[in-house]
Amino acid sequence: MKRRSFLTGLTLAVMMGGSAFLFNSCVDDDYWPYYPPSGWGSNYFYDTRLDGAWVLIQANSSAVGRYDTNYLDFYGGGHGRYYYYSNSRPMSEEMAYFCQRSNSTTTNYQINLQYASGSASTMAYWFTDSENSLWLQWQTTGGQVVTYLYTRTGNIPW
């Protein structure tokens, strides 16, 4: 008799522990705001053409080296992840994004990226090569125009 109650108790404990693990593993993203910060208005959208992984291949018309490249992985709906190298070590951080219409002379769209580290970027973007090449362009505080070229990739190496 006692053996049956012990096994029943053990089974219930394992089920409760497993349930707690499953519920806790789903909570990580709940704190992250996948929507624009206040003040941006309601004229934003999530461009599904961005969905998928992109690898940086050029910066200002020059090829980038292995440890100068980075990756953008857009999951859709404002979720994503940014992969990069720091001191030759692969790193990554969560990112949120949203798109808006732009009055840029280059394109009609801009993307706003917000990184988990707290930094943010707003860049003009457009596509070429049947939407397999993604161009990002912005102006530095010193007035220099920076243009990055990304291409779709099937995988991110880490």
Image (spheres, rainbow, N blue to C red):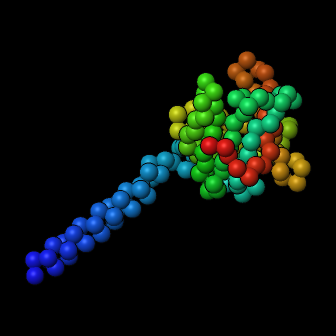
Q: Residue at x 72, y 57 (%)?
A: 48
Q: Is residue 101 left or right of residue 31?
A: right
Q: Can residue 103 be seen here?
A: no
Q: Is residue 38 above or below residue 148?
A: below
Residue lying farthest to the top in this orientation: 142
Q: Give percent across and percent down for residue 135.
A: 81, 40
Q: Nearer the viewer, residue 20 or 147?
A: 20
Q: Residue at x 64, y 34 (%)?
A: 84
Q: Give percent across and percent down for residue 129.
A: 89, 50
Query: Which quarter of the figure is the N terminus placed in?
Result: bottom left
Q: Residue at x 25, y 72 (%)?
A: 11
Residue lying farthest to the left in this orientation: 2
Q: Nearer the viewer, residue 142 or 23?
A: 23
Q: Give percent across and percent down for residue 77.
A: 62, 56
Query: Which quarter of the figure is the C terminus placed in?
Result: top right
Q: Is residue 48 above or below residue 153?
A: below
Q: Is residue 101 left or right of residue 7?
A: right
Q: Give percent across and percent down for residue 93.
A: 56, 40
Q: Residue at x 58, y 35 (%)?
A: 91
Total labels: the figure holds: 0
Q: Can residue 9 be seen here?
A: yes
Q: Is residue 78 left or right of residue 15?
A: right
Location of residue 10 (image quadrant): bottom left
Residue lying farthest to the right in this orientation: 129
